[in-house]
Amino acid sequence: MSTDKVIIMFKDGVSQDQIKEYISQINNGGGEVTQSYGALIPGFAAKVTPDQLSSFQSLSGDIIASIEPDTTVTIQ
């Protein structure tokens, strides 16, 4: 199964319990959360399946602030 590496950021007001539930759904559904940012930054990095990515994209504007590719960024 193919996976996409993404960073998912939640809007202010989304609880840590809600985020932990999404982390659990990813890990139990064929994806893998590779980094959780904790209480200060509401989000995580993950390898997600196409179905999981589609599911999160459907939440954009509701509880998801952004979904970005998880890539290496360099300067010069």
Image (spheres, rainbow, N blue to C red):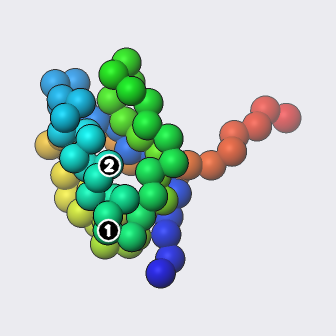
Q: Is residue 59 above or below residue 4?
A: above
Point out the tag, 1 or 2, that comes first from the N-terminus: 2
Query: On the picture, is 34 further left or further right than 54?
Result: right
The crowd level at tag 1 (other Cα within 10 Å; few <14, some 14-19, many 20+) is few
Please name the amino acid that badge 2 sits on.
Ile
Q: Is residue 37 at least partly visible in the picture?
A: yes
Q: Are marks 1 and 2 in contact (CB under 8 Å)?
A: no
Question: Which residue corresponds to the image point at 37% horizontal and 59% vertical from the top-left?
Answer: 27
Instruction: Check residue 29 in the rendering and tell me which mark sits there, or answer none.
Output: 1
Tell me the SS state at disc 1: loop
Location of residue 49 (image quadrant): bottom left
Instruction: Check residue 40 in the rendering and tell me which mark sits there, or answer none.
Output: none
Where in the figure is residue 41, as x and y percent of width and height? 38, 24
Question: Which residue corresponds to the image point at 33% horizontal and 22% vertical from the top-left?
Answer: 39
Question: Which residue corresponds to the image point at 39% horizontal and 70% vertical from the top-left?
Answer: 30
Where in the figure is residue 14, as x and y percent of width and height? 18, 31
